[in-house]
Image (cartoon, rainbow, N blue to C red):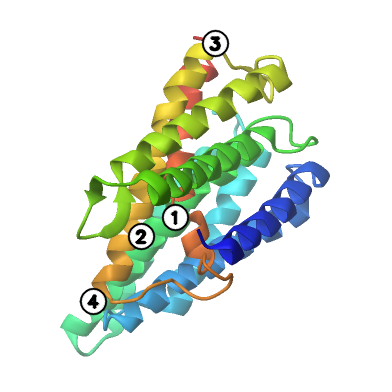
Amino acid sequence: MDIKRIITGLLLATLIIALFLNIPAGHPITLLILLAICGLSLWEFYTLLSAGGLASSRKWGTAIGIIFCIATWLYMINPMPSNQSVLPSDTLLWSIMLLVVISTFYRLLGYTDMRDGLNHGLGTLLGFIYVPFLFSFFIRLFLIDDISQPAWIAFYTVLTTKISDTGGYFIGSRFGRNKLATIISPKKSWEGLGGGILFCFFTNILWIFISNGYIGSLPFSFIHALVLAILFPLFGTAGDLVESLFKRAVKQKDSSSVAYGIGGLLDMIDSLLFTAPMFYIYLQFLLASGE
């Protein structure tokens, strides 16, 4: 066990919990924090590509990523029904998404070396899809409930994701024997995945008792607790493995060195980039429908 890494993780967890509990979901400070996390994580990803000799347009990619996240925030803060005479905000949001993609391809025309332009375009779009697009679902979870209150749904997402990661780390480091993905991440084990599921399940049960069976304003039953105890570790592990694949491909240990034993911001949110979209879809189709 790396005690220093555990202490660093606990300090970060304390800071995150304090921010969640004291800042309303719709407060402008929340937006600035989310944009900073997304922008810096995307910059780290482009830096990883550069370290591996892969081209991208870092400044342009980071700018369009932040713009898309702001558009997502505005859409969730003030969604307009489709029967309004003005352009519906969901149409505006996806129009911005289209402009992001088209403008990136349009920039290819400015390169004298067509292969160089193609490489920059592909790297830029990969970063946009991997970080801002997936992270935008976390922003949606932040604002899907009462924005004048703490973002309980987003807090639950972070809590279960990180508890799953923690369970996987503790159980895997102590009992891990059967490797999950030897080439991509030799330390990942099936025992660790099982530990993540177990930790997540107990967290969900505890959440039910503390919240009287609700996540925010949405009912949360034992069946949901059981299903999500499996889904969160599965998707969180997949997110961690995908980032490990990127890092191994460019021969880098961490995306940066923001926190000891944890790495950069991208290392901190890699699992969240997969669990947030999963939970948003689950919430829309199952939790919000009351099933």
Whether label 4 touches label 1, CB < 8 Å: no
At label 3, the amino acid type is: Gly
Whether label 2 touches label 1, CB < 8 Å: yes
- Mark 2 sits on what residue? 243
At label 2, the amino acid type is: Glu
Residue 2 percent location from the top left of the image: 53, 63
| Disc ID at residue 270 | 1
Q: Earlier in the sequence, mark 1 or mark 3?
A: 1
At label 4, the amino acid type is: Asn
- Mark 4 sits on what residue? 119
The part of the image, by quadrant, that contains residue 191 is top left
Determine the residue positioned at 44% across, 55% down.
Answer: 270
At label 1, the amino acid type is: Asp
| Disc ID at residue 290 | 3
Q: CA distance from mark 1 to mark 3?
A: 30 Å
Q: Residues within 10 Å of mark 1 (few under 14, many from 20)?
A: many
Whether label 2 touches label 4, CB < 8 Å: no
Q: Earlier in the sequence, mark 2 or mark 1?
A: 2
Residue 247 percent location from the top left of the image: 33, 69
**Relative side of 181 to 44, left or right:** left
Q: CA distance from mark 3 to mark 4?
A: 46 Å
Q: Earlier in the sequence, mark 2 or mark 4?
A: 4
Can residue 37 be seen in the rendering of this structure? yes
Front: mark 2 or 4:
2
Residue 174 percent location from the top left of the image: 41, 48
Closest to the observer: 63 or 135? 135
Q: CA distance from mark 2 to mark 1?
A: 6 Å
